[in-house]
Image (cartoon, rainbow, N blue to C red):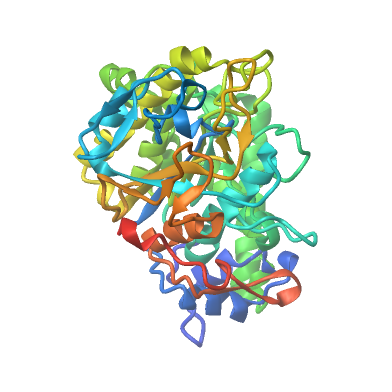
């Protein structure tokens, strides 16, 4: 959601602020009325100043549950894989030896080992289901969890409420929407995508560069934009049709001219040892940047561990080229991921932010219980593990269980709707909130009967 809000001091005769009207400037384009917007916002029970936030780490490519979070040390070799199970800081919970830093902080993590879904075993089908709680059907694209939060709560600062790092997901092979958008809530609720690698030397966000760095042409363009915005604000003050004001346009201007936003994205403000702690790679620096953005007032950050399953080493361990081998996961993916994630959790805890910031690690599916002839594992939505920390989560536990070969849930099956409901619950959203859906039809933020994974809280 890219809304540009005023100072909120001007009120109408019914007590609504100028901020309320400016935040819904794009409602007409998505078929919502001001009363519908305000009713949903009030129903959600959210205060605009609520400090609760979420960092969603999407493990694009899908880790093998049997080689990471749900070890089966007593299974045959073709099931258990090549890695040893190790004890953790949480009694009774073992993890893979390739994740020793996860093992150190397992007392802060709640693992859910019985996640499954009935969607196609293609990456983008799982992407949309796990980020929105639903499979897209009938031409209806459900909004990302961060877009729903943006719609109900809006922004707190000059920064957007919903950010994706380092950029939106690329191809997944199924030619399906990936779920990282505002869906039927409209493009006004789309995330701000960084579109840059924060680990490169002299990293800067192009649209946040100061005038000295952007050249005279862009500077003149910004000045023209400022003039247009000023003129439109004047129109707003004199107009009874405040909802016609374009919130997206104003939000982009506000972001581009904000010292606060520029500072939040400036990783040079971090000590070198802090940056090294996260790892000087794309994922590590995205995790550090996510912490900075949450600290600066962003409500929801999604980090894509990888951008596509093609042409890079990922969790997609089919075993043969062009995909990743189990050894590639062990030597490249796991160390990078383990270091950055543990640094993020410990840093949030040390700064007193973890209690109000949920960090959820999800994926589109798991991997086949049996190692394939190429020495890898293939797609498997029938059972896998996701996990949560912070945001009210009780760490040091495992919810649900898989069968002896990690193939299907043996206890407490959990679907995508319950995963998203758990995120909303941590953020304080009322799970009975109704959104104005396509053509104004009522649309619950989670499917009927879906509730949070209560054992985690």
| Image spot of residue 454 (x, y percent) | 36, 63
How many numbered dots are placed on residues in this image? 0
Residue 81, image x and y in percent?
47, 22
Along the line of sight, the residue nearer the viewer: 241 or 366: 366
Quarter of the picture holding the N terminus: bottom right
User: Where is the C terminus found, in terms of image quarters?
Assistant: bottom left
User: Can residue 456 be seen in this snapshot?
Assistant: yes
Q: 126 left or right of 96?
A: right
Q: From the viewer's perspective, is residue 142 above or below residue 305? A: below
Identify whether 180 is placed above or below 371: below
Residue at x-position 59% and y-position 33%: 167
Task: Examine the rendered structure and indicate whether residue 238 appears above or below residue 388.
Answer: below
Is 249 placed above or below 168 here?
Answer: below
Residue 341: x %, y % from top left: 36, 31
**Side of 109 relative to 242 (left or right):** left
Tell me the residue at 74%/61% (across/down).
Answer: 140
**Which quadrant would residue 27 be assigned to in this image?**
bottom right
The residue under the point 70% across, 38% down is 122
Image location of residue 124, percent across then percent down: 68, 41
Q: Residue furthest bottom?
A: 14
Foreground: 411 or 421? 411
Q: Can the viewer see residue 5?
A: no
- Name the foreground residue: 225 vs 94: 94
């Amino acid at each position: 959601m890219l809304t540009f809000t005023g100072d909120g001091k001007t009120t109408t005769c019914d007590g609504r602020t100028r901020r309320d009207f400016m935040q819904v400037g794009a409602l007409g384009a998505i078929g919502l009325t001001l009363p519908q917007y305000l009713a949903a916002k009030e129903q959600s029970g959210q205060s605009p100043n609520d400090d609760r936030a979420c960092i969603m780490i999407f493990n694009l490519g899908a880790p093998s549950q049997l080689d990471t979070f749900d070890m089966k040390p007593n299974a045959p070799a073709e099931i258990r894989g090549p890695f040893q199970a190790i004890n953790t800081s949480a009694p009774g919970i073992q993890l893979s030896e390739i994740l020793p830093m996860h093992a150190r902080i397992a007392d802060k993590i709640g693992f859910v080992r019985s996640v499954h879904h009935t969607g196609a075993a293609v990456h983008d089908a799982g992407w949309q289901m796990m980020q929105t709680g639903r499979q897209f059907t009938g031409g209806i694209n459900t909004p990302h969890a961060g877009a729903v939060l943006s719609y109900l709560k809006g922004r707190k600062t000059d920064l957007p409420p919903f950010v994706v790092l380092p950029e939106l997901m690329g191809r997944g092979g199924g030619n399906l929407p990936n779920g990282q958008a505002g869906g039927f809530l409209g493009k006004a609720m789309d995330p701000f995508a960084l579109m840059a690698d924060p680990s490169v030397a002299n990293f800067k966000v192009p649209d946040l560069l100061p005038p000295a760095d952007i050249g005279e042409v862009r500077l003149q363009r910004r000045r023209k934009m400022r003039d247009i915005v000023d003129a439109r604000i004047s129109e707003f003050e004199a107009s009874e049709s405040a909802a016609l004001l374009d919130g997206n346009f104003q939000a982009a201007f506000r972001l581009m001219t904000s010292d606060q936003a520029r500072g939040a994205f400036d990783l040079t403000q971090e000590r070198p040892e802090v940056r090294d702690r996260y790892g000087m790679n794309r994922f590590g620096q995205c995790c550090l940047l996510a912490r900075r953005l949450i600290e600066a007032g962003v409500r929801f950050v999604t980090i894509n561990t990888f951008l596509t399953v093609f042409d890079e080493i990922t969790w997609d361990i089919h075993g043969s080229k062009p995909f990743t081998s189990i050894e590639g996961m062990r030597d490249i993916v796991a160390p990078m991921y383990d270091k950055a994630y543990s640094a993020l959790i410990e840093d949030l805890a040390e700064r007193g932010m973890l209690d109000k910031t949920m960090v959820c690690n999800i994926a589109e599916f798991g991997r086949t219980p049996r190692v394939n002839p190429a020495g890898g594992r293939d797609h498997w939505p029938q059972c896998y593990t996701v996990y949560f920390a912070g945001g009210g989560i009780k760490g040091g536990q495992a919810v649900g269980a898989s069968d002896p070969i990690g193939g299907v849930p043996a206890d407490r099956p959990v679907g995508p709707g319950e995963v998203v409901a758990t995120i909303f619950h941590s953020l304080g959203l009322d799970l009975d909130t109704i959104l104005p859906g396509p053509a104004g039809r009522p649309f619950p933020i989670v499917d009927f009967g879906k509730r949070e994974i209560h054992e985690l809280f």
